[in-house]
Every structure is written in structure tokens, then in C-alpha cells.
Image: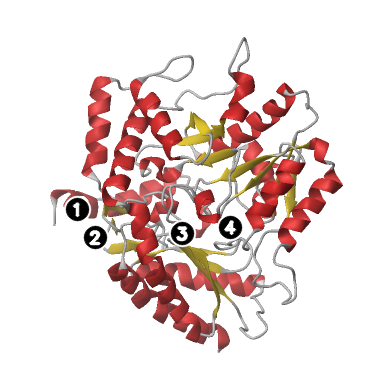
């Protein structure tokens, strides 16, 4: 046991007490942690695994919330951060520039598809989405279309928690406590075809988006915001041709297309940007999380030259910003992160091993609770059902027990961190580090299979 492990182990009780007394965890039912219920405390990360306060190793099959795409404990990130702190610890991009933000903007623009050559840094994904919504409205106003203020998103989609991003978010249960949100958020059906009628047209969801735009009046719509692979609802993929049809709809109505890639960028789907996987060209990309490997908070809005054009000359200005956007330490770490991606060909690694990952999950279909397996790259989900023949789901009470009363705890105790979620239908999501391969997927299966089998035995008995 290392000296760090000794210190952590010796203070575990104190940490639990302090967490209960002072720490307000995000999206967490704090009342669920009574004196007999331990708060999970992660103390160390190494490669594809993390360790809790007891020294127990866990396979991080969520990349710490879709963030640590190159794994944990990269010394080159720490070295880049330390060197930058000694050179220039901080300066803002608010009316000033510094070398690292310039270099990172150039590098990101070089990786982004098409003419997306201008990079506006933020501190998070929600802030990137907020910036994209504001620039979309501002862009139309600059062209004399100030009435275009509405944002079209999809049902069950998550786009962030700030008030503009929350308006785009299609999850009713996380919005109502904060309403009224920013006006103008509208929602079209998503592309989850698992529960569709067998004879439904594959491009039905795209057609419904077109209908919504027509109903709302195209002259009031500023932008459509979509994830390449929708997160909430369980890794929902698009139908073939969906994004091409959406691009046509946006072009026909002078609407900007925002690709929200806070999760889907930086190799998650086997490409630097998820839109490349599905072959469409957005006007704006939002990103964050794995841009820095999550070692330092950072996000970005990447826009096409045509979107930047109204702000490029004269006295025009995009009147938006934040103190820490483009932070030099974050930018230095992001540059080191992209060096790792290039040196280790992490995007290529995903494309090489995604078939093994998916085949492992498909192999779970012999367990009756497994209804659907879907996703792409290293972003996959298993939807859980009560009756596989009819695709009947679980009641709210059953889902509550299944996900929170059993699965989350059982998987964690056996050494697996993933996401059991019921935003939409009950699913288990997996987003492992891109450094994972067959050995880690076998490890995942060895934990997942018996837990799902036990869940079915209990819930069907």
C-alpha cells in the first residue's frame, strides 16, 4: 500500500462524514445517503481503472462521465499543466490572446470538418451550447432576421443545465423546477426506432422535424441542435440518411445546424467529431469534456466562416464571453491530449475494437431482460425490458428498484462503473476510455452478465 493509500484509508470515515455534512453532489439524491449508506469516493485513477477509498479497483466504463477518453493518470498532462503554470499561469481571452489558446484554436480548426475555422473557448459543455444558441440568434439578427429566436431540439435530448441550454434540453423532469426557461425551445421526436411500428418510414423523425419547423414558422427558427448519437434515452443512433435530410431542411429554411458533440467528439465514435461518422456538415459544433481529457475544465464552440463573418469587421462584436474561456493551462493540457490522440491513434483504436465491444453486448441477448443493444464506437447502451416479445417496459416503481435499488449498486460493488439511467426507457450505458480493448470488454462482460441475470431472476420472480 502506498503512502497515499494509507492516508486515504485512514481518513475514509472522516471523508464520509465531511461529504455528508458539506458536499452537495450534482444530480444526486442527497437524502439517499443516510448513516448506513456510503458515498462512493474515488481517490485514484490509473489507465482504464479507478480506485475507491477502500482501495477497490473499478473498471471505469463511463470514462468519468464521458470525459477521460485517453484514460486516467497521464503524466504528460500533468507535465504540460505544470510547465504552463510556470510560464503563464493565467490570462484571459477577454480582449487578449495568449500562445496556448491560439495554438489550440488552430489545431482544433484543422481537425474540424469543412469550413469550421473559428474557435470560441468556454469552460464547459453547457456554456458551449449557451454560446451556440446566442451566436445563432445574433447571426440572424445581423442579417436582418431578428425574429428568428427559436431553437429546435429533440425529445429526451440533454444539452446542458444553463438556462439557454436547458431550454434546448428535452427532458421535462429536469426543467420544470426551473421554469420558465429561455423562451423558444421546441422539440421534435428523436430517432429511437426500437418502439416504432414495423412499417414506419426510416426518415419519419426527420419528416416530423420538418413538420415542426413549418408549424412554428421557419422565419422564427434560429437553429436546430442535435447530437450525432443521442445520449439521453440510451445511445440513440440516427437512421441512414437522417442527417442528410436534416441538413436539406435547414438549408431550405435558412436555419443553422448545431452539432452538439460535448460527448460525441474526440474519438468517442471513432472520429475526432461525431458528425464525420454520419457524414453531415454542421454550421456549428459544440464540444467539451474529452477536449482536455477532463484534467482541466474546457469547452468550445467551433463555427463556420460564414457564421463568423458578421462579427469579423468594423465595430461588430459577439457580446459574450467568460473569464476562464481559453484558460492557458487548460489549453496546454488540451494540446498534450491531442498529441496522445495522434501518437496512439485513439480514433483508429475505436474503429478497430468497436466490433468486439458490440459483439460482447449483443451476446447478452440470451438474458430475457435485455431488449435492445444500440450505439456506435465506444458509446453503447443496453435497453432493459419486462417482455422482450412485446417490448413492454417497466413501471416507474419497477424501474426505480431495478436501476437504483439494484443494478447501480450491484455493478459498482463488483467493480464496474457505468450508467443505469431511466431518462426515457431504462438503459445501461457504456462509454469506456478509448484505450480499452478486448481484455477490458471481457472484464466488463464478466461483471455485467451475472448482474443482469440476477436482476431478471428477481424482477421476474
- Rounded to the nearest whole Å, what is the CA distance between mark 1 and mark 2? 7 Å
Image mark for residue 5? 1
- Rounded to the nearest whole Å, what is the CA distance between mark 4 and mark 2? 32 Å
- Rounded to the nearest whole Å, what is the CA distance between mark 3 and mark 4? 29 Å
Badge 1 element? helix
When the figure is inspected, residue 187 is found, relative to residue 331, above or below; the finding is below
Whichever of callouts 3 and 2 sits on the residue coming sooner in the sequence is: 3
Mark 4 surroundings within 10 Å by alpha-carbon count, few (fewer than 14), some (14 through 19), many (20 or more): many
Badge 4 element? loop
Whichever of callouts 4 and 2 sits on the residue coming sooner in the sequence is: 2
Whichever of callouts 3 and 4 sits on the residue coming sooner in the sequence is: 3
**In the image, is 180 to the left or to the right of 116?**
right
Image mark for residue 34? 3
241, 49: nearer the viewer: 241
Image mark for residue 55? 2
Badge 3 element? loop
Q: Is residue 370 visible?
A: yes
Q: Are marks 1 and 2 in contact (CB under 8 Å)?
A: yes
Badge 2 element? loop
- Rounded to the nearest whole Å, what is the CA distance between mark 1 and mark 3? 25 Å
Residue at numbered disc 4: 232
Amino acid at each position: 500500500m502506498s503512502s497515499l493509500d494509507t492516508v486515504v484509508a485512514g481518513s475514509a470515515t472522516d471523508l464520509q462524514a465531511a461529504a455528508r455534512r458539506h458536499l452537495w453532489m450534482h444530480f444526486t439524491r442527497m437524502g439517499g445517503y443516510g448513516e448506513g449508506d456510503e458515498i462512493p469516493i474515488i481517490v485514484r485513477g490509473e489507465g482504464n481503472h479507478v480506485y475507491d477509498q477502500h482501495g477497490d479497483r473499478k473498471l471505469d466504463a463511463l470514462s468519468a462521465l464521458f470525459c477521460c477518453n485517453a484514460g486516467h493518470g497521464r503524466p504528460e498532462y500533468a507535465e504540460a499543466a505544470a510547465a504552463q503554470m510556470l510560464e503563464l499561469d493565467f490570462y484571459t481571452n477577454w480582449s487578449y490572446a495568449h500562445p496556448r489558446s491560439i495554438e489550440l484554436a488552430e489545431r482544433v480548426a484543422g481537425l474540424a470538418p469543412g469550413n469550421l475555422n473559428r474557435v470560441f473557448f468556454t469552460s464547459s459543455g453547457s456554456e458551449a451550447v449557451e454560446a451556440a444558441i446566442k451566436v445563432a440568434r445574433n447571426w440572424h439578427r445581423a442579417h436582418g432576421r431578428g425574429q428568428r429566436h427559436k431553437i429546435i431540439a429533440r425529445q429526451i435530448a440533454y444539452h446542458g443545465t444553463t438556462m439557454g441550454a436547458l431550454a434546448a434540453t428535452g427532458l421535462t423532469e429536469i426543467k420544470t423546477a426551473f421554469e420558465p426557461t429561455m423562451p423558444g425551445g421546441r422539440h421534435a421526436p428523436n430517432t429511437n426506432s426500437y418502439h416504432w411500428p414495423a412499417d414506419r418510414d426510416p426518415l419519419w423523425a426527420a419528416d416530423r422535424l420538418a413538420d415542426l419547423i413549418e408549424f412554428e414558422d421557419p422565419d422564427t427558427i434560429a437553429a436546430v441542435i442535435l447530437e450525432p448519437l443521442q445520449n439521453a434515452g440510451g445511445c440513440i443512433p440516427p437512421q441512414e440518411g437522417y442527417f442528410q435530410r436534416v441538413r436539406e431542411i435547414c438549408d431550405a429554411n435558412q436555419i443553422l445546424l448545431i452539432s452538439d458533440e460535448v460527448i460525441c467528439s474526440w474519438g468517442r465514435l471513432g472520429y475526432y467529431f461525431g458528425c464525420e461518422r454520419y457524414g453531415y456538415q454542421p454550421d456549428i459544433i459544440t464540444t467539451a469534456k474529452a477536449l482536455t481529457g477532463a484534467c482541466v475544465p474546457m469547452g468550445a464552440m467551433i463555427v463556420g466562416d460564414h457564421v463568423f463573418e458578421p462579427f469579423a469587421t468594423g465595430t461588430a462584436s459577439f457580446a459574450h464571453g467568460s473569464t476562464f474561456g481559453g484558460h492557458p493551462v487548460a489549453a496546454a493540457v488540451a494540446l498534450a491530449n491531442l498529441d496522445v490522440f495522434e501518437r496512439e491513434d485513439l480514433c483508429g483504436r475505436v474503429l478497430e475494437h468497436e466490433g468486439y465491444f458490440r459483439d460482447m453486448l449483443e451476446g447478452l441477448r440470451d438474458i430475457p431482460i435485455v431488449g435492445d443493444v444500440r450505439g456506435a464506437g465506444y458509446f453503447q447502451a443496453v435497453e432493459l425490458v419486462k417482455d422482450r416479445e412485446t417490448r413492454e417496459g417497466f413501471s416507474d416503481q419497477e424501474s426505480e428498484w431495478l436501476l437504483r435499488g439494484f443494478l447501480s449498486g450491484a455493478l459498482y460493488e463488483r467493480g464496474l462503473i457505468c450508467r443505469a439511467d431511466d431518462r426515457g426507457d431504462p438503459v445501461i450505458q457504456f462509454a469506456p476510455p478509448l484505450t480499452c480493448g478486448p481484455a477490458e470488454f471481457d472484464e466488463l462482460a464478466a461483471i455485467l452478465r451475472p448482474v443482469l441475470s440476477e436482476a431478471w431472476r428477481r424482477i421476474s420472480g
